[in-house]
Structure formats: C-alpha cells, structure tokens
Image (tube, helix red, strand yellow):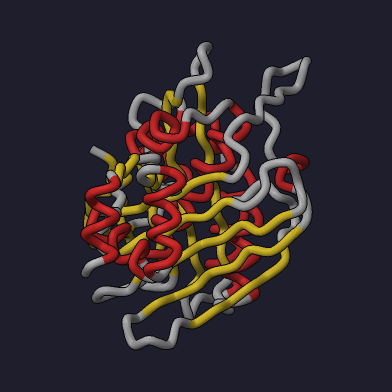
Amino acid sequence: MDKIIKTLSKSGHFRAFVLDSTETVKTAQEKHHTMASSTVALGRTLIANQILAANEKGDTKITLKILANGAVGAIISVANTKGQVKGYIQNPDLDYKRTATGEVIVGPLVGNGQFLVITDYGTGHPYNSMTPLISGEIGEDFAYYLTESEQTPSAVGLNVLLDEEDKVKVAGGFMLQVLPGASEEEIARYEKRIQEMPAISTLLESDDHIEALLNAIYGDEPFKRLSEEELSFECDCSRERFENALLTLGKDELQAMKDEDHGAEIVCQFCQTKYEFSEADLEELIND
C-alpha cells in the first residue's frame, strides 16, 4: 500500500513529506496504457498532487494542471484529502530515452507552459494559483510553485523508475519546507544536505526508499513522525454521474443519439472506464 509520512524537525523549523507512490503510478500506467515518457510525466504529476492534497483539510479537492506546449499536451490530476488521486495525460504514447544512458526524457516533451493549481474548498468559489513551468521536469516546477505562489521555500524530488519492459518499478518523492523561525545556520545545514543528496532515482532504488529519503533529508538531526497516511489511485466516476451529464445535452441531442448512433458510449478520461447507454436507456432519459 502506498503511503505518505509527514515529519517535523525537533526544532519545529522544517517539515518534510516523504512518499511511496508506486502502486498509484502503476495503476495509472495500467489504466491509460502509457509509454515510458508519458508514464513518468503523468506519475510525477500525480505525486506532486498527492503532496498538495496532503497539505489540506476537510473535503478540499486539488486539481493540478500542467498546461504546456510540448508533445505531452495537458496533464490533469485531481486529489483529495483522503489520499486518493486520479489523472490522465493528453498524449499517452510518448517514449523517448537518451541513447547513452537510457534515461527517460520528460522536460523537453512537456515544454513551456503553466503549473496551475485549483483549490476547491467546497464553497463554490475555487481558488486558482499559477506559476510558469521552469523546466518541464515537474519536480522543479512544483518547487518553484511552492516557493513563489505559496511563499514557502521548498525543495522537492519526484520520480518514477521503470523496469526493462518500461513498467513502473518504483515511484515516490519528498518535499522539504522551511518554516518560520529557522535560523540562517539551520537553513544552511539543510541546504547543504539537499545539495549533497544522492539523485532521487538513486534513493528510490534503495531497499526502503522511505527511510533513505528521511536519512538524506535530516541526516543526524532529530525529527518526529507526525502521521502516516495511505495513498491510492481512485476514480470517483459513476454511471449516475454520466447520466446527469447526458441530461444536460437536452432532449433533441439525446434523440439524435438514439436515432443515429443507436446508443452512446462514454469513456471516463481519468480511468478509461466505459459506460454504455442503449437506445432504451436514452429513451428513458428523454422521458425523464
């Protein structure tokens, strides 16, 4: 089971979230049949949104949109405070690797654009916040968003590692934030550790990457674990929801579907579940 562990330094001046999101990204890959570059780009976006949602309380929902001009197109993710996330990528078929290293290419395929976060508190007035993409690698763009938009200096590492068949082997990441009251000396110590930290891909390859991440972040500094929460890829789509969507089309449009297409098939963008509506189903909606 995937999880996020929230921690706080003993001084109370730094907090870190560390995540194992392997099953989340595996499920996304299976549902969307994504190829290597698309899998990593979508996976990093899902992990970033798991972190964003873990910052919220109540019934808040976070929508993260990577809106860019590169080959991946848009990447959309929705997460809630229960650890559930869903998402999709506009182009699932990208598979580019560096010849020398075999490293999966992401940034150039995402391109330039915006990192858009929509926070819905359930009041009917969602809050939008947006920063430009600075690299397209998602992790760096997320750190920039946290620092610029939320005014919290942050370090972020996100990655998805694939096996020889380009299936998800491990996925996860971390977020470290400086809280009010931290001294320059403390900040310098943490900065030095982050700069000297092994690559996120190396840490994820560890036998226990959660502990490896915590060790890399805190070193010998004491910290406490505040909570451990489950994470998962979950879609909340339903037949009833799509019935309601069909009803918004109006009776003439539904009649045309019945007469010309002899039914309707709707596919959920987030999880690829198919919902079939027969002529009889459409007739019932028309008469509703």
Is there any visible trace of residue 11 in the rendered image? no
Above or below residue 10? Residue 3 is above
Query: Is residue 182 in view?
Result: yes
Q: Is residue 248 left or right of residue 99?
A: left
Instruction: Give the residue at the far front of this rendering.
Output: 259
State the residue in front, 143 or 119. 119
Is residue 91 left or right of 60 when viewed as pictured?
A: right
Q: How many marks?
A: 0
**Residue 96 appears left or right of 162:** right
Q: Position of residue 66 (x, y in %)?
A: 61, 57
Q: Quadrant of residue 38?
A: top right
The residue closer to the viewer here, 240 or 287, is: 287
Name the image quarter holding residue 232.
top left
Residue 282: x percent and y percent? 29, 55
Q: Residue furthest top?
A: 164
What's the residue at 23%, 37% (across, down)? 1
Image coordinates of residue 251 in percent, x first then y, are 37, 68
Q: Would residue 163 appear left or right of 23 to someone viewing this image?
A: right
Report the quarter where the C terminus lies: bottom left
| Residue in view at x 62 percent, y 30 percent | 93
Nearest to the observer: residue 223 or residue 98: 98
Q: Is residue 123 above or below residue 157?
A: below
Q: Residue at x 59, y 67 (%)?
A: 116
